[in-house]
Image (tube, rainbow, N blue to C red):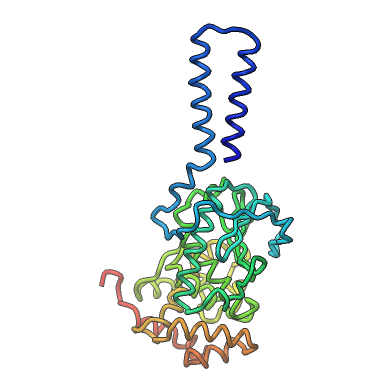
């Protein structure tokens, strides 16, 4: 609305200035009328056009058309991420999120808010938790999303207790917006893990990343479908038993080629968690997983919580992992 009125004022002032300077031929007046019409139409489309059609093929949260915008400085809001990030102080508030950005247009922030809300609905339904269970009670406790139009850093999207960093829909550097909903589900799952279980380091990396991969159906990575793929993975150089990975840095060569190693290891982490929760596998439920994280949040170590809620020890799962995968998955992806 403000942009539209500004365009109207500038267009009228420009035409008035020409009229006051001299009397132009009639064709000049026609030209300026057409020019002002096109200019105002362009301004109006910048103001509200993209917001009319935000929902594509990805999951989409149908929120209010005219969203509330918050001045982070006036409201005393901080990102509270372990990152040196700046934002434009035009923060979008949704039911559960605050969308910060370095330079995103309004329509891209709104679309990010819709995507984040859709992801959280999926996760809350899966684990049977409410916003209050996740500590979301007022403006200051809402989940922060930093929607990066510029490069979000070497590591790309990542999560913290208070929220996560994600590429913006109008990013200068990321040209695959159709993957943003899946990656948002992955990162939002990590935030739920943080809020239920406390410090991320309390839970082994294979389980944290595997659960996020499982919830997001693989995100940007492939989904392992058969035993042949697991067996091929096991025999590839630089691969160790995934259940042994407590920290990502334990993955061979992770510091040198972390993105390649993520692409290699995250799918095997995902199928490791899928086995635990699949009725055709170990048969545990998402609520069992939720209770595991809650116990960790109350101070229980991961090994004990895993044994209590999954029904086997980490040592047993590691020792029998490949045999369990062979029994769980079809032999060939053609089956």
The number of numbered discs placed on residues in the rendered structure image is 0
Looking at the image, which residue is at 59% across and 25% down?
A: 11
Q: Quadrant of the C terminus?
A: bottom left
Visible residue check, residue 50: yes
Visible residue check, residue 234: no
146 vs 327, left or right, is right
Work out whether 163 lies above or below 105.
below
Asked whether 35 or 129 is in front, the reply is 35
Q: Position of residue 330 (x, y in %)?
A: 30, 77
Q: Position of residue 183 (x, y in %)?
A: 50, 62
Q: Position of residue 182 (x, y in %)?
A: 46, 62
Work out whether 289 lies above or below 40.
below
Q: Quadrant of the N terminus?
A: top right
Looking at the image, which residue is at 47% across and 92% down?
A: 311
Looking at the image, which residue is at 27% across and 69% down?
A: 334
Q: Position of residue 198 (x, y in %)?
A: 64, 79
Work out whether 312 lies above or below 76.
below
Asked whether 127 or 205 is in front, the reply is 127
Work out whether 58 lies above or below 202.
above
């Amino acid at each position: 609305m403000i942009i539209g009125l500004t365009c109207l004022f500038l267009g009228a002032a420009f035409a008035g200035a020409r009229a006051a300077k001299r009397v132009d031929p009639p064709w000049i007046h026609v030209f300026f009328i057409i020019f002002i019409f096109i200019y105002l139409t362009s301004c109006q489309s910048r103001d509200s056009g993209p917001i009319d059609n935000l929902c594509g093929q990805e999951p989409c949260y149908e929120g209010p058309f005219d969203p509330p915008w918050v001045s982070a400085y006036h409201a005393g809001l901080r990102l509270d991420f372990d990152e040196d990030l700046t934002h434009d102080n035009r923060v979008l508030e949704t039911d559960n999120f605050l969308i910060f950005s370095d330079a995103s247009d309004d329509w891209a922030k709104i679309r990010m808010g819709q995507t984040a809300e859709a992801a959280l609905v999926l996760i809350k339904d899966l684990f049977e938790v409410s916003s209050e269970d996740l500590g979301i009670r007022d403006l200051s406790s809402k989940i922060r999303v930093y929607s990066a139009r510029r490069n979000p850093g070497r590591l790309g999207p990542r999560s913290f207790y208070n929220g996560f960093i994600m590429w913006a829909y109008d990013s200068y550097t990321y040209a695959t917006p159709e993957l943003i909903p899946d990656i948002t589900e992955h990162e939002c799952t990590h935030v739920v893990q943080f809020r239920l279980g406390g410090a991320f380091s309390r839970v082994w990396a294979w389980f944290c990343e595997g659960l996020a991969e499982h919830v997001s159906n693989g995100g940007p990575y492939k989904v392992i479908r058969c035993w042949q793929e697991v067996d091929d993975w096991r025999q590839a150089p630089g691969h160790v038993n995934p259940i042994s990975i407590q920290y990502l840095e334990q993955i061979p060569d992770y510091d040198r080629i972390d993105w390649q190693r993520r692409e290699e290891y995250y799918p095997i982490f995902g199928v490791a968690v899928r086995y635990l929760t699949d009725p055709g596998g170990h048969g545990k439920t998402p609520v069992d997983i939720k209770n595991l994280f809650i116990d960790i949040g109350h101070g229980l170590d991961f090994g004990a919580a895993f044994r209590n809620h999954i029904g086997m020890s980490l040592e047993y799962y590691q020792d029998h992992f490949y045999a369990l995968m062979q029994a769980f998955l079809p032999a060939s992806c053609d089956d």
